[in-house]
Image: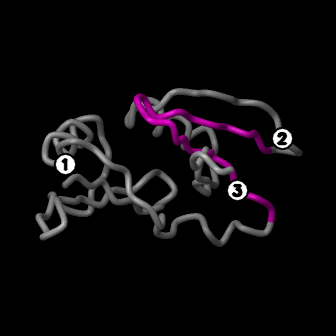
Amino acid sequence: MIKQLKFVSIPTRDQDAALAFWTEKMGFRVATDQPMGPGQRWIELSIPGAQTGIVLFTPEGQEDRVGTFFNGSFACDDVEYSYKQLSARGVEFEGPPEKQPWGTYAKFKDPDGNSFVLSSR
């Protein structure tokens, strides 16, 4: 039976720029980086302390997904702290963290313009 979600795909135009962003600014680690078809690589990244990872790959015909909203959320213990740390590394946020009844969140963007939620309880 299914045990977990192994990875989610983040569409990208420039795999090198995306790889630099997710490793250098976000702190993820390369699990796999290998050729996959003409001009593309399969880049799988692990998130320290998590079982789920991300893949920086855009399947042919899915290019219109680049620069859209990622339908998911990256969890952290403290959004305010993470916001300050990631902002200092050059991560672009849409605004400061906001508190809601369900928790605190902040939205950030990657170099391709994809938008993500960072949240905590």
Camera-side residue: 54 or 120?
A: 120
Query: Which quarter of the figure has residue 87?
Result: top left
The amino acid sitting under disc 2 is Met
Q: CA distance from mark 2 to mark 1?
A: 35 Å
Q: Secondary structure at mark 1?
A: helix
Give the residue displayed 48% in from the left and 64% down from the top: 70
Label 2 or label 1, whichever comes before in sequence order:
2
Q: What's the distance in space between the residues labelled 1 and 3, CA to CA?
A: 29 Å
Tell me residue 121's x, y (percent). 19, 55
Residue shown at 11% from the left, 64% from the top = 99
Residue closest to the eye, 6 or 61: 6
- Given contact means CB atoms under 8 Å apart, are the residues at marks 3 and 2 in contact? no
Callout 2: 10 Å neighbours few (<14), some, many (20+)? few
Place of residue 5 in the rendered image (x, y in percent of width and height, measured from the top left): 58, 49
Instruction: Classify mark 2: helix, strand or loop.
Output: loop
Answer with mark 3 or mark 2, whichever residue precedes in sequence: 2
Q: Which residue is mark 2?
A: 36
- Residue 24 at x, y percent in the picture: 42, 29
The part of the chain drawn in magenta is 40-60
| Residue at the extreme right of the image, as rendered | 38
Give the residue type that dot 1 points to.
Answer: Val
Q: Tell me the quarter of the picture where residue 19 sits.
A: top right
Residue 15, placed above or below residue 89: below
- Contact between labelled residues 1 and 2, with CB atoms less than 8 Å apart: no
Q: Write down the residue under mark 3.
A: 58
Residue assigned mark 1: 79
